[in-house]
Image: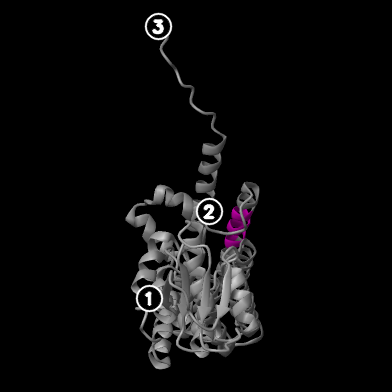
Amino acid sequence: MPKIFIIFSSAATAETRVAGVPAAARAAQAIEALRASGDVDGCAIIAASGWSPSAEVVAECARLAPRLPVTFTGSARGEDVVRIRGERFVAAAARHAGDPRRDTILPALLSAMMNPSASPVDDAAGLADLRRAGRTILTMTGKAGDGIVSRYFNRPISRAISSVLLMVPGLTPTHASIGTAVLAIAMTLALVLGDGTGLIIGAILFQAASIFDGVDGEMARATARTSEEGATLDSVIDAFTNLGFLVGVTFNVGLAGDLSGALAGAIALVTVASGLWMMSVRVSASGEPLNFDIVKKHLRKNGDSHIVVEWLIHLTMRDFFAAASAMMIVAGLTHQLLIMFAAAALGWFAVTAATLHLASRRRSAPPLLEISECS
């Protein structure tokens, strides 16, 4: 097998964080996909004469390419050697950083091959390639199930936040989840302790929490740190944020004398809490990590659903609810919001209960007997 040399223009570009991961480690992660298929059995990373990789580079190479022998050297010597421009390779492989495979990484490797006599690109061009790679990786961190508001409004903002946070060493997706929880606490306090101004501030913080909620997932997917524990923490924070908003708004309008609005809020709160509890019990019984997507998954069974069902799913998702709530409260329509949400919550609960009941019946139904003809 030929020796693979990943050559960066300088130590600065090799150490540059690309969506939270040093460029040298990004290259090693991509080569790991080729090692698994038997195309290579190791690689060497070159940045500059006398370069000593930082502890972060070494640790990230070990984390992202645990079975790939990686060495750090000062030159690429030998006859059976394949020289690869590091910055260009990282940029070419960026679109597949979340799921590197041989059929996607091999073309990226070939596109970044250097002639034996070629010299590395200059730092400016290399940094431009790495910035492009970072943008590409963040663009790919969206979720197929994103709601309408998330896709066209929340995600662009949360990605901009993620791009900044990913440049800070030591920050993890868990820190971003804690940030969402802090926003949720501030929202609840503003709603409960404030008057009309507190109501508006709380509504704006609810939308801010909805936007920031995307950051932890983006950071996790960008840096290959997704985990069941992280997904569970995110789901729990989401649920308590939604319930905290309902508690706060209901309490606020009740103190202001809007008793019918407070009653509607209380109905919505009890209904939503009951639906979330039902889903959590069903998910726990199935052994899956805690999440509240079970109804959506059943409604989208086999990846297909009616367009009306899709619209109803999107209109009942948190991103739409948060944005609509913020706009209606700022416009002075809090009473109407609570009435509408109580009605929507009752309908959502009915669909949730029916879907979970039907799903339970399908699982408990005995298998059909196969009847064969006897000759």
Quick one: label 3 or label 1, which is nearer the N terminus?
A: 1
Label 1: how many residues lie within 10 Å, few (<14), some (14-19) or many (20+)?
A: few
Q: Residue at x 57, y 69 (%)?
A: 64
Chain part drawn in magenta: 271-280
Taking 34 as reference, is 117 left or right? left
Q: Residue at x 58, y 74 (%)?
A: 71
- Judged by depth in the image, the label closer to the viewer, 3 or 1, is 3
Residue, disc 3: 375
Could you tell me if the residues under marks 3 and 2 are in contact, i.e. CB atoms within 8 Å? Answer: no
Classify the position of the C terminus by image quarter. Answer: top left
Residue type at tag 1: Tyr
Could you tell me if the residues under marks 3 and 1 are in contact, i.e. CB atoms within 8 Å? Answer: no
Compared to 93, does 190 lie above or below? Answer: below
Residue, disc 1: 152
Residue, disc 2: 294
Locate residue 225, reporting x and y percent. 58, 69
Compared to 31, does 50 lie above or below? Answer: below
Is residue 301 visible in the rendered image? The answer is yes
Quick one: label 2 or label 1, which is nearer the N terminus?
A: 1
Taking 111 as reference, is 318 left or right? right
Locate residue 332, reporting x and y percent. 47, 84
Q: Residue at x 50, y 78 (%)?
A: 211
| Cα gap from disc 2 to disc 1, whole angstroms | 24 Å
User: Hey, which residue is sitting farthest top in the picture?
Assistant: 375
Residue type at tag 2: Ile
Taking 85 as reference, is 180 left or right? right
Label 3: how many residues lie within 10 Å, few (<14), some (14-19) or many (20+)?
A: few
Locate residue 374, reporting x and y percent. 42, 9
| Cα gap from disc 3 to disc 2, whole angstroms | 46 Å
